[in-house]
Image: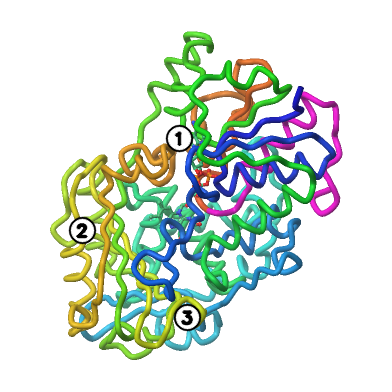
Amino acid sequence: MTDAVVVGSGPNGLAAAVLLARAGLSVELHEAAAELGGGARSARLFDADVVHDVCSAVHPMAVASPFFRGFDLAAHGVEMCRPEIAYGHPVDEHRTGLAYADLDRTCERLGRDGGRWRRLMAPLVEHSREVTTLLLGDLRHLPSPGPAALLPPRILALQADLFRGPEASALLAGVAAHTTGRLPSLVGGGTALLLGHLAHATGWPVPRGGTQVLADALAADLRAHGGRIHTSSRVTDLRQLAHARAVLLDVAPRGLLDIAGAYVPAGYRRALEKVRYGPGAAKVDFLVSEPIPWQERELAKAGTIHIGGTRAEVHAAENTVVAGRRAAEPFVLVAQPMVADPSRGLPRKQPIWAYTHVPQGDPLDATDVVRRRIERFAPGFGDTILASRAVPASELEAYNANYVGGDISAAAVTLRQVLARPVPRWNTYRTPLSGVYLCSGATPPGPGVHGMAGLHAAKAVLRKEFGLNELPAGWA
Ligand SMILES: Cc1cc2nc3c(=O)[nH]c(=O)nc-3n(C[C@H](O)[C@H](O)[C@H](O)COP(=O)(O)OP(=O)(O)OC[C@H]3O[C@@H](n4cnc5c(N)ncnc54)[C@H](O)[C@@H]3O)c2cc1C
């Protein structure tokens, strides 16, 4: 008999496994892919000297999340490298919004909108720990008043355009677009405040050596606490795990249906079948011979660049994709990790990470559209490309079953599916099956590399299945 089996080695699966192993349980983890990490994998795609992040690349939530704070990445040899500018957003050929890690500098650069940006962000930065804990919470505990009161009026305010110039509005619209949903929206507003204030609190860092180091650090810790890891081990039926007292599934709702659909009550099954999946991500990786030749020189200091034009243009592109059509000028996210972490490549061989939003299951090879979008603000970029690789939204699911139709959130991030994620239940981590839990980004607090769904699910398992109310040191 094994105390706990975890299915899936994404950041949430690994986080849950680490917590359970550190609590003294015997833990076994099964990962379908040959490599560990789920959405936190890196690969040398074109050249042995150059590391590319296959899925996630930029990690404000990993440094801010209570799970990773308790884990202490630095103590595990992981260095988070923080670019001077968290994210930039060219609005047109002449105007660019820049979110410096330094709040004062950001406000200064925003000129007449600087005061308003400060009033929006400064209180959140000051109470960042409480704000982050609340927004990465399990949605079942009442927030402590005070910092929590900062959020609702701000989220509501962001439904309108708050600023006089286009730069600040575009900056926030670009961050809200990380939800890959309709805009403006309450969910987009919450995301803009979470990630937006973190730019000035923890920054938007990249891990030295590539995102894989996060997964490797967790896996090493799991093994050090007795955990056993099986890669290339896809679980297809819950009956394969009959030897476990508790099962934690780092899978999308559809994965839960595949593994356990035959055993769950009909009502729960119908609810899982009704879960909606959001638009897809069409990924493009480039190997380039020099840094991107941005017209706006300051963008050379930014770890992330959002290409989407004005607030209205970002909204129009996102709403078109939500409606199931390709946007003529889609929103594109670009990361240039060597700005902060030179170890990723060589001066004449550098990785560029990008993806754009497309309709569910779109087979589009986005190489040309992404290149064209970057070239608008960086003429000559195309001439620097040595190699490229596209993964259409329709193929992302083959790489990771959680990305249904290319939805990188494991279930659409709509208001309904944020409040009841993935289905309405008091404890959404528990399934109706005895001892079987969900722990993926399809549960609160949703997508991102933060490990918090894993932490919340592991907490429930320890309490309900093993009568342990105390979390291991670091998370107590
Ligand atoms: C292109 C892209 C860019 C992104 N960028 C960022 C970013 O910059 N920052 C950020 O914070 N987040 C980003 N994300 C989102 C982030 O990667 C995910 O939200 C996060 O990885 C979710 O973690 P998870 O543990 O819930 O699931 P996942 O990381 O998706 O891991 C699930 C794991 O379970 C395995 N699995 C599934 N079914 C089975 C089965 N039946 N048997 C065995 N194993 C199974 C899968 O193979 C996978 O390894 C990005 C995602 C993508 C795809």
- Residue drawn 38% across the image and 86% down it: 300
Disc with the residue nearer the chain's start (2 vs 3): 3
Quarter of the picture containing the N terminus is top right
**Mark 3 Cβ and ligand 1 under 8 Å apart:** no
Which circle, 1 or 2, is nearer the viewer? 2
Quadrant in the rendering for residue 316 = bottom left
- Report the label total: 3
Residue at (73, 53) in percent of width and height = 221
What is the C-alpha distance between the residues marked 1 and 3? 32 Å
Up the image or down, 221 lies above or below 198; here it is above
**Dot 3 crowding, Cα within 10 Å, few <14, some 14–19, many 20+:** many
In the image, is residue 437 above or below residue 203?
A: above
Q: Dividing the picture into quarters, in which one does residue 410 lie? A: top left
Magenta stretch: give its range. Answer: 449-476
Q: Which of the 4 quarters of the picture holds residue 27?
A: top right
Question: Which is more N-terminal, label 3 or label 1?
Answer: 3
For label 1, the residue is 417
Residue 303 placed where, x, y %? 44, 76
Q: Secondary structure at mark 3?
A: strand
**Residue 360 % position (x, y):** 26, 40
Three-letter amino acid code at disc 2?
Ala
Residue farthest left in this picture: 328
Q: Residue furthest front?
A: 48
Magenta stretch: includes residue 457? yes
The residue that label 2 is drawn on is: 366
Q: Nearer the viewer, residue 207 or 185?
A: 207
Element under disc 1: helix
For image coordinates 56% across by 69% down, the residue present is 207
Q: Which residue is mark 3?
A: 85
Amino acid type of disc 1?
A: Gln
Indicate the amino acid at tag 3: Ile
CA neighbours of label 1 inside 10 A, class few (<14), some (14 to 19), many (20+): many
